[in-house]
Structures are given as structure tokens and as C-alpha cells.
Amino acid sequence: MTDTQGNKSAQGVTTARGAVGFGARRGVVNRGAVTTADRARHILHTQLEADFCQPVGSINRALKEMRDYPEAESQPLLATVQPPSEKMGSSRRRNDDIWELRVANYAGVGILCAKHPRVLEKAIDYMLGDQANWLGDYAPLRQLNELLTPYTQQVSGTSVYYTPGRAMLNSVVPEGVKSQEVKCSLPGVGMMRRVDPAELKAALLAEITGERVVRTEANASADALEADPEDIAVGETRLRVDLLSEEQIESFRGDARFTNALGFSATRPDVLVLAAYAVDGEPTDGPVAVVGVSDDSPIMRQIGVDVVPAFRGAGIASTLVRDAARLTLAEGYLPFYGISPSHIISQRVAMNAGLVPTWWEYVSTSLNDLPMD
């Protein structure tokens, strides 16, 4: 494992760890930073339409239908049969494509895609009305699972996905970086901020890398609950944050402490990794936290984070997730953060970082694909 503690980071981006390869090492062209809700929404709609094999523009049309007919008894439902993989959208997330049925709820719009027409018909019948809004509850999920059982299918996973809120989008361009409001050429996107990509990355890395103090707010209820006085005080943790190079990332392969942050996937490679090292106290064995960003699709990237147990609860995870998201937006990609609906701690990390819940997703797989050992 590469332990870079003791090597003081210089100010500015020119000597930040990994900064030389940031963006350029992957041959990425300038996509323009994502700084507005309109552009983030356009990317998200493009992604969901590709993932669920929906026609381009179908989500916008469904949302317009909801606005035009607010008293309608049934919410819009987008449904299609999954085409062969070679005919699926090139922007889709790089999953294994072994799912049999995929369901999502985005802003009240139900989205369905199934491999087999008879499964799709059953799912459509079940999803009529506003069932998409309640499908994540246990009883509806169980009923859907029972509908799928005759077709040798079962529920295999549900997730809530978070994306940047307006406050984070507004924070992508730091103060002092010149920007210009321009009309975006994409229909329906509206205005966007034009900024020099090199200047933007340099400014962000100057803010993010090097020594920093992460603060947690005092517990406002500590007095009333007669809690320990330590809970009342503002917490502070001094860290040094490094942007890792590809060689440094590779040194963590097989490290069980950081499996959420680093996937080492051939199809979804880790393209941006920040590591946080403790400055005060006893020396630690490597970083106390790592956040990674994986290249999950041509337009969106997924964030994962791990914090070693001794440093949890100090606000480090939210800080690093926010940093990684801002850097990802600066490169022109929309970051997302997937969470189990029952993982409250991860949801708090996402919200404290400036991410907001955006869509819920369900996947079923064939019982024939279950491991038998």
C-alpha cells in the first residue's frame, strides 16, 4: 500500500497528487462543466431513457402530461420490451445486462423495461394508477415478486439514486473563476456557464487538495437530552486530501477497507480518487477515507466512499463525496450515488454532501441465474 503521509502538499494544482493526469490521462475532450439544473436534468433524462430503452424525449413528454392533467387518475407509465443489446442505447450504464425486469420511479413517472412481453404486460397491469410511487414498500414489492414467480423471476435489488442539488451545481465554479452565461445549443437546456476548463480544475483542486479542517455541527438537542458535553461541541478533524494517480489507485487493489470507493472494474473503471490522511494524532496505516468515481456510462459517473471505523461520524464522508461530485461536474459528467433504501447513514452522507434523492430503481433477475452452491 502506498502511504503518502509526511509528504506535504504544495499549494495550487501544479503539484497536487494526481493532478497532472486529472482528466487528461483518459484522453477526455472538453465537455463543458455541468453547472445548471437544466443541463443536469437533460443528462439524467438521456441516461434513464437509454437504461430503460425508452424513446428519446419520452420522459419530458410524460412530465408534461402530469403538468397538463394534474387530476388524472393514473400517472404516466413508460413501458417497453428490451431490445437486443446491440440495439440498446450507447449511453446506457455499463451493467451486465442480465436483468429480466427493470422498474423505476422518477418524479412520479413509472418506467418499465422487460425482456419478455408477457412479463411486461403483467408489470404494466400492476403499475397502473400511482403504484410507481409506492412500489418500494414491502407489500407491493412482495406482490410484484409473486407476479414474477411463475416466470421464474425474483426481486434481486432496489436502490435510491442521488444526484447534485441546485446548491451543489451553483458551487461548481469557485469565486474568482471567470465565467460567462451563454445559451446552450441543446433544446430545452436553457442557459449554461462557460468557463475555462483548466482554470476551473486548478481552482477546485486548490480548494480540495492539501491540508483542510472538516467540521461537524454541535448537537442542538444535547442539552435537553442531558448528553455528554462532548456532543455539544463543534467537532474538528484535520486532514490532508490527495488526488491519487493511477499508480497510487492500483496500490489499493484488494484492500478490504475501501471496496465501496474502488471497484477496479474493467467495464466501469475508477477514474477519479481522493484519499484523506489524518494530520493529528497517532500515525495511521494509510488513508482514513477514500472516495472514488467510476466511469459507469458515457455521461454519468458513480460515487462511492469508505471511511475507516475510527474516523466515522466526523463528516469526512460527506465532505469527500461533495468534493468528488464537484470535480465530476467540472469535467462535464453528472455524478450519482446509489444507496439501499434502508441504509440511512449513507442517505445522510449523500444529503449532507448536497445530493438529493432523484430516482428509485428495482431490478429482477431469473431464478435460473441464481448460484446453486
Image (spheres, rainbow, N blue to C red):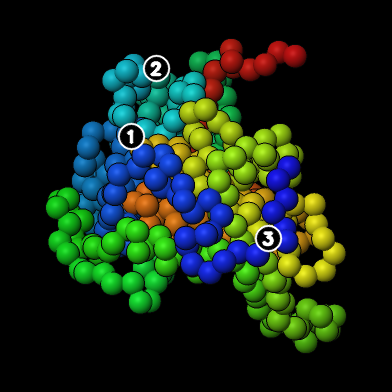
Seen at 18% across and 60% down, the residue is 190
Q: Give the residue type that dot 2 points to.
A: His
Q: Give the residue type that dot 3 points to.
A: Asn
In the displayed orientation, state which residue is furthest to the bottom: 223
Q: CA distance from mark 2 to mark 1?
A: 22 Å
The residue pinned by badge 2 equals 116
User: Mark 3 or mark 1, which has the lower sequence index?
Assistant: 3
Q: Residue 97: where, in percent of width, then height?
A: 45, 23
Seen at 68% across and 60% down, the residue is 7
Q: Secondary structure at mark 1?
A: loop
Evaluate if marks 3 and 2 touch, with contact meaning CB atoms under 8 Å apart: no
Mark whose residue sits in front, 3 or 2: 3
- Residue 57 makes an appearance in the image: yes
Mark number, residue 7: 3
Left or right placement of residue 75 versus residue 225 in this view = left
User: Mark 2 or mark 1, which has the lower sequence index?
Assistant: 1
Asked if 348 appears above or below 107 in the picture, the reply is: below
Q: Quadrant of the C terminus?
A: top right
Evaluate if marks 2 and 1 touch, with contact meaning CB atoms under 8 Å apart: no
Mark whose residue sits in front, 2 or 1: 1
Seen at 45% across and 39% down, the residue is 295
Q: Secondary structure at mark 3?
A: loop
Q: Give the residue type that dot 1 points to.
A: Ser
Q: Residue 272: where, in percent of width, then height?
A: 51, 47
Q: Residues within 10 Å of mark 1 (few under 14, many from 20)?
A: some
The residue pinned by badge 1 equals 91
Q: Secondary structure at mark 2?
A: loop
